[in-house]
Every structure is written in structure tokens, then in C-alpha cells.
Image (cartoon, grey):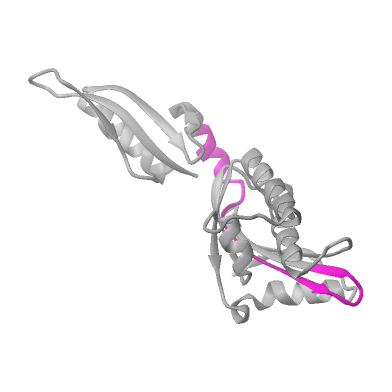
Amino acid sequence: MKLRLEWTYILPKHKQTFFMKSDWMTVQQAILLNEDLEKTGRLQSIEFLDEHDSSWMKKELLVFLKQFETEPHNVTGYIDGGFDAKTGLAGIGMAIYFEQHHKKWRARMNDSLELIEDNNEAEYAALYRFVQHCEELGIHHQTIQVYSDSMIVVNQASGEWPCYEEHYLTWLNRTEELATKLGLKIDYELIERTQNKEADQLATQALQGTKIESKQETK
């Protein structure tokens, strides 16, 4: 989770009050800045705001940090979707990397889906199921990085391109609603297909009837 601070500050001699804003920073940095400002004795008020403009109290952030030690964080994900026009079957795959309990983990999952119209819809389905899997892993209230080789999904989901196709928009809205519920901000990055081999293989295996779901510690 990223925070920005807004505070009112009193200058020592003229007793003038100034309203200040910070750049985005980590929770730890926000708490440290708050403590430094408090030491001056001239801090009148301060507010902690997250990426969704939700306001936090300092004691809530301290509890969050304590929980953060045991919950998944530093999350990155790779997603991919494939579509077989002959069978009308779609395959989706994802690999999620995160840290928890001072260890690094990788979760892998794939699935096959029916009633999908094309490859781009399969890519959107993979994105939605990725966020669902994040919920299952207990990932919430943080910024996560998602890598995809789908130009359509990356640009539409990030807001760079409008989304007019109704069957894509349905998946996109469901994804955004769930991400908001979990307090997740998703940063999207377009990568080459060669950089997305793991998720691509998982999607292909799903099309071939091989189901995979695993979680293991990594180095």
C-alpha cells in the first residue's frame, strides 16, 4: 500500500498555518515522516490517504504493519489466456510471486473455461481469476504488479484505451470491483510473449486437460 500525507503546519515566528502535501510513499516512510513532524511541536493536523483516497489513522497503520509481517506482500503476477476456436474452449494460466513470513513464494494455477468468445476474452478471464486467487491467498490493501503479453488487456485495464466490447467490459468491471473490495491497486505492464512463458505454458496445459494448482517456497 502507498500513502500520501496532507498536513497543516504552523511556522514558529509568525504563527502562520500552511497546508502541505507529500509524494506517494510506503507505510513505513509515512509513519517516520509523521513522527519527525510531531517532534517539531508545530504539527497542527495530519491525514494519511491511500491510493483509493481512504483515510487512515496512525494506530491503524501500526496494526496494518504488524499484520503485514505475516501476510503476503511484494506481489507480482504473470497471466495469460488461450482460446481454441475449434473446441470453443479457453485456457487460462497465472503465476503469482510474493513474500510472506520472511520467505519467498510462488503460486501457480490454471483452468479451462467454456462460453468464451475469443482469445482476448480469455486474457480478461485470466486477469479476473488472478485477482480471485489473490483474494484466496489473503492479498489485500497494497499495490501489485501484473505482467501480460496482451496489448488489449494491459491498455484497456490501465485506462490507456477505452473498452467498448461488452464481453470484455463485463470481465473488466468484475475485476475492478473485486480489486476495489480488496483494496488492491494494480499496475499493468506489457511484456513480450517470450517473457511470459510460465503463464503461457499453464494456459496451454489447461487446454490440454492438465489442471495445476500449487504453492511452493522459492529462493
Image height check: is 113 above or below 1? below
Viewer-proximal residue among 217 and 132 = 132
Image height check: is 172 above or below 45? below
Q: Residue at x 61, y 46 (%)?
A: 71
Residue 134 part of the magenta-drawn span: no
Which image quarter is the C terminus in? bottom right
In terms of image quadrants, where is residue 126?
bottom right
Q: Is residue 77 visible?
A: no
Residue that sits furthest to the left in the current view = 13
Viewer-proximal residue among 219 and 28 = 28
In the picture provided, is 86 more to the left or to the right than 53?
right
Residue that sits furthest to the bottom in the current view = 194
Which residues fall within the magenta stretch?
Answer: 62-91
> How many labels, in total?
0
Residue 84 part of the magenta-drawn span: yes
Viewer-proximal residue among 9 and 82 = 82
In the picture provided, is 23 more to the left or to the right than 42?
right
Q: Position of residue 35 (x, y in %)?
A: 31, 32
Q: Position of residue 117 (x, y in %)?
A: 82, 64
Q: Residue at x 27, y 34 (%)?
A: 36
Image height check: is 43 above or below 170? above
Residue that sits furthest to the top in the current view = 15
In the picture provided, is 45 more to the left or to the right than 185?
left
Q: Position of residue 28 (x, y in %)?
A: 41, 42
Q: Position of residue 68 (x, y in %)?
A: 55, 43
Q: Residue at x 68, y 47 (%)?
A: 173
Residue that sits furthest to the front in the current view = 164
Q: Residue at x 92, y 74 (%)?
A: 87
Q: Is residue 192 visible?
A: yes
In the picture provided, is 206 more to the left or to the right than 63?
right
